Image (spheres, helix red, strand yellow):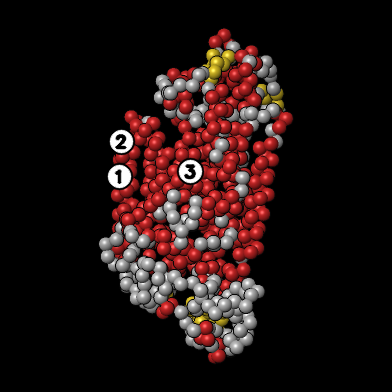
Amino acid sequence: MYHRQRRLQNNPAAAAPPPRQKLLDNHGLFDDPEKIFQDEILKHEKRVRTDAGAGTWETLRGKLFVSIPFLDTDPPMTTSFLLKMLASIRIASAFYSVINDCDEIYNYWEPLHLLLFGRGFQTWEYSPEYSIRSWLYIFFHYIPAYFLSFITADSKVALFYTFRILLGFFHAAAEFHLYNSVGQRLGYGIARLYFIINLLAVGTFYSGFLAIFCTAFSALVGWPFAAVLGLPIVVEMLLIRRGEYIFKFIKNAILSGIAVLALLYTVDSHYYGKTVIAPFNIVLYNVFSKHGPELYGVEPFTYYIKNLILNWNIAPFLALLAVPLSLIAYIPTCCTFDSKNNKVTSQVIRPTNSIAYWYRFIPVVLIALTAFVWSFIFFSQPHKEERFLFPIYPHIALLMAITLSSIRHFIPKKFNFFPYLLVATFALMSISRGFAVFKHYRGIAETHKQLHDYLVFHPDVHFDQMNDPIQVCTGKEWHRFPSNFFIPEKATDKYGVTKKVELHFIRSAFRGLLPKPYEIGAVPNITRLIPTDMNELNQEEPSRYIPVEMCDYLIDFDDGTNGNPDEPNFVQVNTIY
């Protein structure tokens, strides 16, 4: 791609296509390469005249480093290969990735478990008194999970992983669409690099009207701050092409907002039992409340830098170079072509302020700008969590791919392997990080899974000696509890005694507010109840704990020490276990 373009720029004589030649195969005569090239030039000239300086990609159809799509000589990867690779890695992610944030468990998996099985843990966010979480988001997950529950009726753990695979397929579909979009808009060389980086990234392993609607839906239903990700759409339609799209944007934004808000109002008001629009509440809490999320810990800005390096190693540093390097590589590719007298010559255009000159480079600027704005917002917040950076992970992968593709324009042909050497380095470090996380943090989920299977399939103890319901306890590992999907609804011993199974908390060194089990009853009646012993100040509620002596099973972490009075080493406390 870039070598053919370079020849056109530096040597007009070399711009002429290869000599006329006839290529034969078993079926007949191939098209003449010279004629094909001439036709592409004529099509490009016609598109330029049609565009009349507006700089619309839909008309000009250029790519980042080539003004004529024909010059993009990097072939696209086959659909079959893409789907196989994406399906394989996302299925593996469903089974082997670690849930590293308890908020995902208690604010998403637990409400989903409640809708499916009638019980689960409730956080203060889901109390009707505060109602800052939307039930609509949970309800959209509930619909497919409900049908999957019939297939995996013997094991809730199987349902958990099957549903994660389903989510992985949605993730893969989005990645597949993004690959094709990048290939069509920026070039298939960049798309290939993006695909490889995104596929191997440990961070990802663990993360039109339709565009406006999806932005509105994700912001209002999922997370209000996701609206920032729609920045490229806003800039494109309101600033760059305001004459053509401003009224379409306003109309579609209003229609999308009304449609999504109507769904939110209906579903959330149904489950909370009062008029609720949850996204407004979460903005009020995070932005305007006196205490806000700082109650749950504050970190310096270096917290995110460390997380980016751990999850993306060299990628963030390369991503920072995407705009300047691609700009340097972009300017020489802005050429006009003259095909008079059957000769093709090119002339480099000097940079101008027109959109027609920059239209192929604008997507790079908008992608980078979105990532920078998102980073600025969350780097400046005192309360920081790793998951807050997940939405810009695709931006990091794409910007790194743009950097690597730009580098290829500055190095001799014999060093073309250098960008792929960087990719190999990135891949090796990512795989190492992924293996380390799996090895050191997989234990708690595996332990819960083994206990689940033991109670459901082959218990060799007599339940008469245990509480009814059977009480499984956790203390300092409460934040790694993988959800009630790993706690069976009931268990039957070899003597035919059947009892329910419940998870309880014992006291540890943690002094914040723990979740509380929902009341027993029917949904939505129990979701409309204001729970007792609940607060938004992260203040400890002693009613959450039961004495350790009441536990039938205790899941805890043995760190090899003697522990302390709040968190004893239960392996060494022989009087209890």
Disc assigned to residue 247: 2
Type of amino acid at the residue the image marks with label 3: Ala
Q: Helix, strand, or loop for circle 1?
A: helix
Q: Helix, strand, or loop for circle 2?
A: helix
Nearer the N terminus, badge 1 or badge 2? 2
Question: Picture coordinates of residue 524 (x, y %)?
Answer: 34, 70
30 sits to left or right of 264:
right
Type of amino acid at the residue the image marks with label 2: Phe
Residue matched to label 1: 254
Q: Quadrant of the C terminus?
A: bottom right
Q: Helix, strand, or loop for circle 3?
A: helix
* Residue positioned 59% across, 69% down in the render: 444
* Residue positioned 56% across, 37% down in the render: 321
Closer to us: 191 or 508? 508
Question: Picture coordinates of residue 109 (x, y %)?
Answer: 47, 65
* Residue positioned 53% across, 48% down in the render: 393
Residue matched to label 3: 371
Figure check: 104 above or below 242 = below
Question: Picture coordinates of residue 320 (x, y %)?
Answer: 55, 39
Q: Quadrant of the N terminus?
A: top right
Q: Residue furthest right?
A: 414
Neighbours of disc 1 within 10 Å: few (<14), some (14-19), many (20+)? some
Q: CA distance from mark 1 to mark 2?
A: 11 Å
Type of amino acid at the residue the image marks with label 1: Ile
Does residue 531 show up?
Answer: yes
Q: CA distance from mark 3 to mark 1?
A: 26 Å
Nearer the N terminus, badge 2 or badge 3? 2
190 sits to left or right of 521:
right
- Camera-side mark, 2 or 3: 3
